[in-house]
Structure formats: structure tokens, C-alpha cells
Amino acid sequence: MHMPKNELVAVLGAGNMGTTIAQVIALNGYRVNLWNHGRDLEPLLKIKEQKENINYLPGIKLSKNINPEFDMARAVSKATLIFMAVPSTFIKLVAKQAAPYLSGREICVDVSKGMDEKSVHLITDILKSILPKNKVATISGPAVAKQMVEGNFTVMNVASSNKQAIGMIKKVMENKNLKLVATSDILGVEVAGSFKNVYAIAMGICDGLSLSTNTKAVLFVSALQEMALVVAKMGGRLETVYGLAGLGDLLGTGLAEKSRNRRLGEFLAQGLSLDNALVKISQVVEGVPATNVLYGLSKKFKVKTPLANMVYKVVGGKLSPKAGMQNFLENLK
């Protein structure tokens, strides 16, 4: 199904990734409404004035096809695809805000990926419950926003139970620098995409303690093994964990200098409190709620996740990063 270029795409969330997705789609020739929640209108104001999201993507001139939209009704009411690019904690709120203006024919794409900390439901399941008539999909993979928006070659997974939805998403997003690999394993993509943030914090702790590449390699292997155990127990596929949304995203986030989750671990290892580290990063760090979710799920499914447990205790202030890492490495089996 070919989408005419005059069709409209809405991106809800004008942070790093939301703005990046808007730019990719706009440069592919589609009109994009970019919306942000009312408590943070500065990105939209700056885009309107200067064609640049100075707060989140400084130095990137944005396409004239991007329309900063302050009103939810105007942002979504004529859109064919709606990309939900707000932090996972706000997904429910934003979906409920959009719901009255949707016809049910739109394709809703989860970009935040993961699970709701309170209900421990997949974000895609939350979207389905609020928007039962809409087709729902998710995209996830090794995609650092700044690198992606600068045109560096990027490959991600797109997951949905609906092939038409996958086709439409590929149509608006793909170009010579961005490819999407289709899968029907929504659970694997969402869970791996969420939990890699927890392990990226561990990589940051490793960096903050100035540990060697040898040690970091051990952490990567442990992280992958733990993710595989949890995803398999929940009913996801192992090939998803060893693919783009799992191993790929874990490498991308765990090694990226600017990754918020990695930086959080580094700051904690350098002696900053969680609150001070979050202030220094000054953006939402998805790995923090994800540590609680993963800890709870490992108990529920009786899966041993010593690396995730260490991150949970360090983030929760129950253990110092140095003692936590030392204890984890000494007890490796």
C-alpha cells in the first residue's frame, strides 16, 4: 500500500528521539506534526522560531515539513500514523489525551518501548487497551538519536501483529540510511528494549569505576544471558534478544558516550547521588523505572539476574557502586 506524500504523520514527544523520527520522516517527504506536552513547550517554540530543537538536538536544522503543533486535537486528527515518543511513564496519559481525536484507523507506533512500572504491562498492551480500534506497532533497536538524525546508517526492528501496519511504517521511515527489520515478536522487542537500559547503567558503572574492557565484556555477556532468561520466561523469542532490539540496542546504549542510562551509571560510580545524577543529565532516564520492573519480574518468574539486582540496589541507594560491582564479579559462576 503506497502512502501519498501529502499524508500526515504525527509525532507525540519532542525530545531527542521524537524530534529525530520527525526529521527522518520529514526528509522522506512527509508532513509531520510534532507535539509536546504542555509543561515543556520550549522545544516547540524554538522549532517554530529557529527550525532547531536547541534543548534536545542542538545544531540540527530541521525540515520545513515539520510543523510544531501545540494542540493535541490538531496534531493527531488527520494523521495516518502516530508515533508515541514520550517517556514510558507518560504513555498512558498521552494516549488518553489523543484518544478522543482518533478515528480508529490510525497506526499507533510505540517508540518509548518497554513496560509500565506500575502495572508491569507492555506499552503496546496499554496502547491497545486505550485505543482498541487502532493498529499498534513498536520500533526498537540500536538507534542513538543524534547519530540517526545525522544520517549515520541505522537498523531497527519494527514489530506488529499487523503486516499492513509494518508496511506503512517502513514506507514513511526507511531510506538509504535507515532500515527496519520486521518481526511479530512484540513482547521480545518491548522487553529487550526496556531492560537493555538497566544493563546500560551497569556499563556506565564500569566506566565510572575505570574498569577494563575485559571486565565490560563480562558484563555484556551476563546482561545478554539475563535478558534471554527473562524474555524466554515471559514468552518472547531468543532470536529477538540476540538481534537488533536486544544485543544491538544493548551495545548501542551501553557504549554510547551520550547515552543517558550509561551516563547515569558513570555518575553514580563517581559518587553522585541518584537525584544529583538525574539533575546533571536533565532528561528522563528510562533505566531507573526499568530497574524496578526487571527486579520484580525476576522474582515473579524465579529467574536469577545478579547483574540486574546489583543495578537495582545501586540505583536504590542500598549498595555503593564499587561494592556492588566487586560483589557481582566475585560471585560470578
Image (spheres, rainbow, N blue to C red):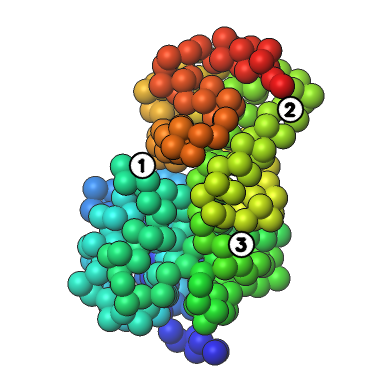
Mark 2 nearby-residue class (10 Å; few <14, some 14–19, many ≥20)? few
Residue 151 seen in the current view: no
Q: Hey, what amino acid is under mark 3?
A: Asn
Q: Residue at x 66, y 15 (%)?
A: 331
Tell me which label, 1 or 3, sits earlier in the chain: 1
x and y percent of residue 128 in the render?
35, 66
Tell me which label, 2 or 3, sits earlier in the chain: 3
Q: Which label belongs to residue 117?
A: 1
Task: Using the image, determine if residue 294 lies above or below residue 130.
Answer: above
The N terminus lies in which quarter of the figure?
bottom right
Task: Using the image, determine if residue 204 lies above or below residue 254.
Answer: above
Residue 240 seen in the current view: yes
Label 2 with label 3: CB-CB less than 8 Å = no
Q: Which residue is drawn at 58% across and 74% down?
A: 170
Q: Which label belongs to residue 218?
A: 2
Disc 1 from disc 3: Cα separation:
23 Å
Disc 1 from disc 2: Cα separation:
28 Å
Q: Which label belongs to residue 157?
A: 3
Label 1 with label 2: CB-CB less than 8 Å = no
Task: Using the image, determine if residue 127 lies above or below residue 308.
Answer: below
Label 1 with label 3: CB-CB less than 8 Å = no
Q: Hey, what amino acid is under mark 1?
A: Glu
